[in-house]
Amino acid sequence: IYTDASTDAPTASGLRIGILIICSAGQFVDVVDIPTWVIDTWNDRKTYIGIAELLAVPILASCCPEFLREVYAVWFIDNQAALCALVKAASSAQDISVLALLMNLTCLKLGIRAWYEWVPTKQNLSDPLSR
């Protein structure tokens, strides 16, 4: 699984998430534009790329459970902050911590055994989707 986010997408909010799943059932590709009302619920910060990268994970798990139920998943993410929050299931930033915990609860509910792995941006197959 590859997920990525961009803060310079041609959307009202500027935030877009790209998703790519490669599995035995085939491939799934999608793009999700993050509406401004979602961003308004987040803590104020200089840049929203870290939380957008993290948001990609629970969105995918919640919207595509048929691809993820009871699987071992290797999840490639090119953002260190999002990766660390997922591995620890926590963050000092409350909104990031909530998303990380949400993902871990989603994994528990769906029986996903996720291994999160950092990948360089240029090797992230979902990077062009988020642009």
Image (cartoon, helix red, strand yellow):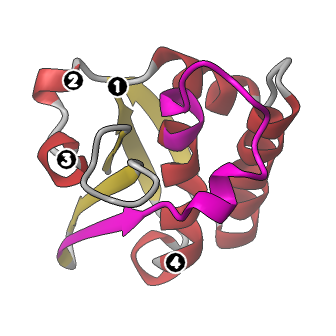
Q: Which residues are magenta?
A: 27-52
Q: Earlier in the sequence, mark 3 or mark 2?
A: 2
The residue indicated by pointer 2 is 121
Query: Relative to 50, is 26 on the left or the right?
Result: left
Q: Residue 22 in the image: x percent, y percent?
A: 20, 61
Q: Earlier in the sequence, mark 1 or mark 3?
A: 1
Q: Residue 42 in the image: x percent, y percent?
A: 75, 43
Kind of element beneath mark 4: helix
| Distance between mark 2 and mark 1 Cα atoms | 5 Å
Residue at 58% x, 59% y: name it.
36
Decide: few, some or many residues near mark 1? Use Cα within 10 Å; few <14, some 14-19, many ≥20.
many
Residue at 74% x, 24% y: name it.
88
How many marks the image carries: the answer is: 4
The label on residue 131 is: 3
Decide: few, some or many residues near mark 3? Use Cα within 10 Å; few <14, some 14-19, many ≥20.
some
Kind of element beneath mark 2: helix
* For discs 3 and 2, the disc positioned in front in the rendered view: 3
Q: Residue 13 in the image: x percent, y percent?
A: 46, 53
> Are dots 2 and 1 in contact, CB under 8 Å?
yes
| Distance between mark 1 and mark 3 Cα atoms | 14 Å
* For discs 4 and 3, the disc positioned in front in the rendered view: 3
The label on residue 63 is: 4
Choose between 11 and 113: the one closer to the eye: 11
| Distance between mark 2 and mark 4 Cα atoms | 24 Å
| Distance between mark 4 and mark 3 Cα atoms | 21 Å
The residue indicated by pointer 1 is 78
Q: Earlier in the sequence, mark 4 or mark 3?
A: 4
Residue 121 lies, with reference to residue 57, above or below; the image says above
| Distance between mark 1 and mark 4 Cα atoms | 21 Å
